[in-house]
């Protein structure tokens, strides 16, 4: 993942029947669910619990934009890896690079822009402690 400041986070996901469509392949929208889990686990690995952040500061992260290329199909019982890295950290947003892989095969390649909202629901600067945690290599 070019442009990342530190190694990406990896999350393993197994495909169940409920993840597939009538054709027996993973329904496209489920890739977005897998990516959401990957982003959440990256934040956890950085020491950021989103529920605690909301409770203590009122700040939340929301998806503003997704660019996603579907390059292959996953099927029942596949074990996938969701690879998530921080490509850019700005004042009020984080750009994350995400790949969903089956072994070395890239099934989905995405760039996700995450915006920070303050307690009033409007764009807000990322709290300094959060920005600092995201700037450090993951544990």
Image (cartoon, helix red, strand yellow):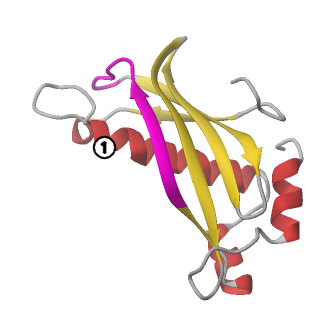
Residue sitting at 42 percent across and 27 percent down?
Answer: 69
Task: Please check the rendered image and state whether residue 97 is part of the magenta-colored stretch, yes or no.
Answer: no
Q: Is residue 115 above or below residue 135?
A: below
Circle 1 Cα neighbour tier, 10 Å, few/some/many (<14 / 14–19 / ≥20): few
* 122 horizontally vs 46: left or right: left
Q: Mark 1 = which residue? A: 29
Q: Is residue 50 above or below residue 54?
A: above
Quarter of the rendering occupied by the N terminus = top right
- The quarter of the displayed image where residue 5 is located: top right
- The quarter of the displayed image where residue 85 is located: top right
Residue sitting at 35 percent across and 32 percent down?
Answer: 15
* 126 horizontally vs 70: left or right: right
* 138 horizontally vs 74: left or right: right
| Image coordinates for residue 128, horizontal then vertical, percent | 87, 69
Q: Is residue 105 above or below residue 61?
A: above
* Residue stretch rendered in magenta on the structure: 63-77
Residue sitting at 28 percent across and 26 percent down?
Answer: 76
Quarter of the rendering occupied by the C terminus = top right
| Image coordinates for residue 33, horizontal then vertical, percent | 41, 48
| Image coordinates for residue 53, horizontal then vertical, percent | 70, 75
Which residue extends farthest left? 22
| Element at label 1 | helix
In the image shown, does 4 or 79 lie closer to the viewer?
Answer: 4
């Amino acid at each position: 993942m070019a442009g990342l400041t530190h190694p990406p986070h990896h999350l393993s996901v197994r495909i169940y029947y409920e993840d597939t469509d009538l054709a027996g392949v993973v329904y496209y929208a489920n890739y977005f669910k897998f990516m959401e889990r990957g982003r959440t686990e990256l934040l956890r690995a950085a020491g950021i619990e989103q529920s605690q952040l909301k409770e203590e500061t009122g700040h939340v992260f929301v998806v503003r934009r997704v660019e996603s290329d579907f390059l292959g199909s996953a099927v029942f019982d596949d074990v996938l890896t969701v690879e998530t890295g921080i490509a850019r950290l700005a004042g009020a947003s984080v750009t994350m690079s995400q790949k969903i892989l089956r072994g070395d095969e890239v099934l989905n390649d995405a760039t996700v822009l995450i915006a920070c909202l303050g307690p009033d629901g409007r764009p807000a600067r990322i709290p300094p402690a959060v920005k600092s945690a995201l700037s450090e290599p993951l544990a």
